[in-house]
Image: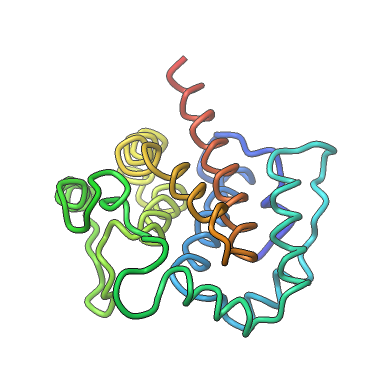
Amino acid sequence: MNEEGSAMSSLQFGMPDDREELARAEVYGLLASLFYAPPSHDLYEQLRVAVTEAPAPGAFLETSWGEVVAAARRLELPTVTDEYTALFGGLGKPEVFLYSSWFIAGNLNQKPLVELRSDLVTLGLERPREVLETEDHIASLCEVMRYLIAGDDLVVSNLTAQRRFFEAHLRGWVEGFCDVITAHPRADFYRAVAGFARDFFAVEGQGFDLLEA
């Protein structure tokens, strides 16, 4: 993230060039980076010096964001890298799956992935050849949301598309996904990340609900 403090701002829905919209896109980009792989050295150093106080007292996400920063300051990067591997990597079945199909259908490469791929075609998006993970990886879904918020093509990048994609491919499973991570005995840094992600997704859901009211 370029402006770490914006992550704790009271997120609101507005025009694509609004500060709140850019903050939302940055948070999705950050979550995509942290769930796709262990943080890079540069990203981890940014986290360790990030602002933890929101511009307004009691703003959304302040507490859980502060926990992410505190964990980054307390733990060394090699420890976090080992934690990522223990939770999400390794040989065979991982401790925690990062794919929506697993949480929705109970197995990988199931109907949710087929439906997602159909929606991505409609949006004009496809998985880069160098990416091995399937499109229902949480990092990929966060990247799509980032694009739908901050992309230049307003035919695709708009609130209607954001709400539709969030409702179809994130809302139904991300809370349970975050709960599994926070409950795992090996989770430390990623317990904080999951708590922040859960709060952020909850705020997103509330915002989209207000659009329908």
Position of the N terminus by quadrant: bottom right
Corner quadrant of residue 9: top right
Residue at image location 52% in from the left, 52% down from the top: 25
> Please, is residue 15 above or below residue 73 in the view?
above
- The reply to whether residue 183 is visible in this rendering is yes
- 55 sits left or right of 144 in the view: right
- 77 sits left or right of 170 in the view: right
> Please, is residue 101 above or below residue 131 in the view?
above
Residue at image location 47% in from the left, 62% down from the top: 32
- The reply to whether residue 1 is visible in this rendering is no
- 185 sits left or right of 158 in the view: right
The percent position of residue 72, horizontal first and vertical second, equals: 71, 70
Residue at image location 53% in from the left, 28% down from the top: 206
User: Between 196 and 184, which is closer to the camera in this rendering?
Assistant: 184
User: Between 52 and 22, which is closer to the camera in this rendering?
Assistant: 52
Extreme-top residue of the structure:
213
Corner quadrant of residue 141: bottom left
The percent position of residue 7, horizontal first and vertical second, equals: 67, 52
The percent position of residue 177, horizontal first and vertical second, equals: 44, 49
Colour scheme of the picture: rainbow
Corner quadrant of residue 176: top left
How many numbered marks does the figure carry? Answer: 0
Residue at image location 85% in from the left, 38% down from the top: 57
The percent position of residue 147, horizontal first and vertical second, equals: 40, 54
